[in-house]
Image (cartoon, rainbow, N blue to C red):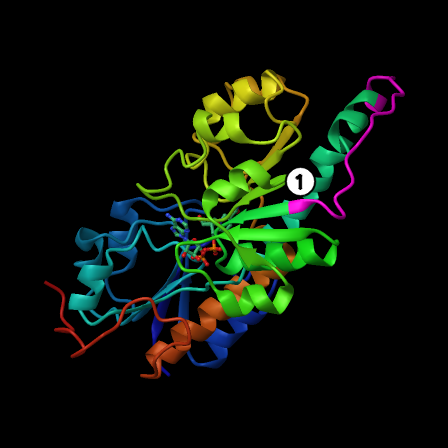
Amino acid sequence: MNKKILVTPRTFGKADPVPMEMLREAGCEVITNPYGRLLTEEEVSELIQDVDGIIVGLDPLNASVLSKAKRLKAISKYGVGVNNIDLDYATQRGIQVANTPGANSLAVAELVIGLMFAVSRRICVSDRNIREGKWQQYPGLQVKGKVMGLIGTGQIGRHTGELARGLGMDVICYDLYPNQEWAASIGARYVPLQEIITGADFISIHVPLTDDTYHLISREELDQMKSSAVIINTARGGIVDEQALSEALQEGKIAGAGLDVFESEPLTDSKLLELDNVVLTSHIGAHTRESVENMGRWAAANLLQILRGETPEFAVNQLTDGGDGNAS
Ligand code: NAD
């Protein structure tokens, strides 16, 4: 295969040599990101001109950038979200787009469990105290027998449900598209969102941020939760009203929160930073060695499948007539 490939994500093939080997063994000439950071529109436009395929992270691939690519046939997203790619334009041009759904979902689900224990056993507070010379015990909460309420049962929500069941928790869940077969297989059940709000001990959020889910958890919902409830958000900031959450935590309306995502990142100026009953992580959900490996290998495999003329395992767009194939 005599193809030229642009690779933009900095972590692609860094810790794991396999994805680069896959491309080179297939005979591809690989150009890597020369800037070591997210590329600008101008930079991608320049680099993309004569490549056949691109493995892309969050760099902009809008219509204007894609119009500069004369030979592009394959866009392989290193990750899941494709909001940086103009899918309509790519489809019209006959450019196949693929992504790596599920590559990092177990990593996020494991972080949920970590945050749940960190909040319920006050692990971070205890750690900070010892470092400050204080030796103090706190009554924690046991998780076995408690109710885990999942909002969203896609890839990450399902993994979280399975891990929670493994810990002896009851699992109730809510999703626009319930997966009854999965729920039955682990002994979980779908309920209306309201039942999660009022009945769950731990509430973990796994829906995308959309117009419909913006501030899905606001003051009204927080007011109805158990005073012992803990919220975990590893999905996106903005799904929870952060101001209302800070106040609810401060006033003891709920017991605690574990947050990996924020309305504005990095989190710098926030009431949350002053509260002891919240554990904060810096959007690390997807970052395990294993998930980075998965993303790299799956992205390379998708790209090679497309360039061989096959439909990739994780196609994002559906090509009908192959598009016009030419840049305009
Ligand atoms: P997914 O697409 O597999 O699942 C999302 C689920 O949400 C689907 O089952 C869908 O039916 C449901 N849903 C969508 N809108 C809904 C609504 N309005 N009401 C109820 N249900 C709704 O996604 P996933 O891979 O499980 O990821 C879930 C979230 O986690 C995404 O927002 C993603 O951006 C985020 N995420 C965070 C990290 C991190 O590093 N913290 C990493 C990966 C993904």
Q: From the viewer's side, name the closer residue of 256 and 114.
A: 256
Which residue bears the numbered disc 1?
A: 115
Quick one: quadrant of the C terminus? bottom left
* Residue 138 is inside the magenta segment: yes
Q: Residue at x 46, y 63 (%)?
A: 101
Q: Where residue 222 sits in the image (x, y, percent)?
A: 51, 28
Q: Is residue 283 left or right of residue 133?
A: left
Decide if residue 279 is in sight here.
no
The image quarter in which residue 69 lies:
bottom left
The image quarter in which residue 256 lies:
top right
Which secondary structure is most common in the magenta stretch? loop
Decide if residue 308 is in sight here.
yes
Q: Where residue 66 sits in the image (x, y, percent)?
A: 21, 58
Quick one: quadrant of the N terminus? bottom left
Q: Is residue 47 left or right of residue 172?
A: left
* Residue 245 is inside the magenta segment: no
Q: Residue at x 59, y 40 (%)?
A: 199
Q: Residue furthest left?
A: 328
Q: Is residue 235 left or right of residue 211?
A: right
Q: Is residue 262 left or right of residue 55?
A: right
Q: From the viewer's side, name the closer residue of 172 and 82.
A: 172
Q: Where residue 198 sits in the image (x, y, percent)?
A: 55, 36
Q: Where are the magenta residues, as a range?
A: 130-147
Label 1: state its secondary structure.
helix
What amino acid type is highlighted by mark number 1?
Leu
Q: Where residue 314 sits in the image (x, y, percent)?
A: 40, 71
Count of marks overlaid on the render: 1
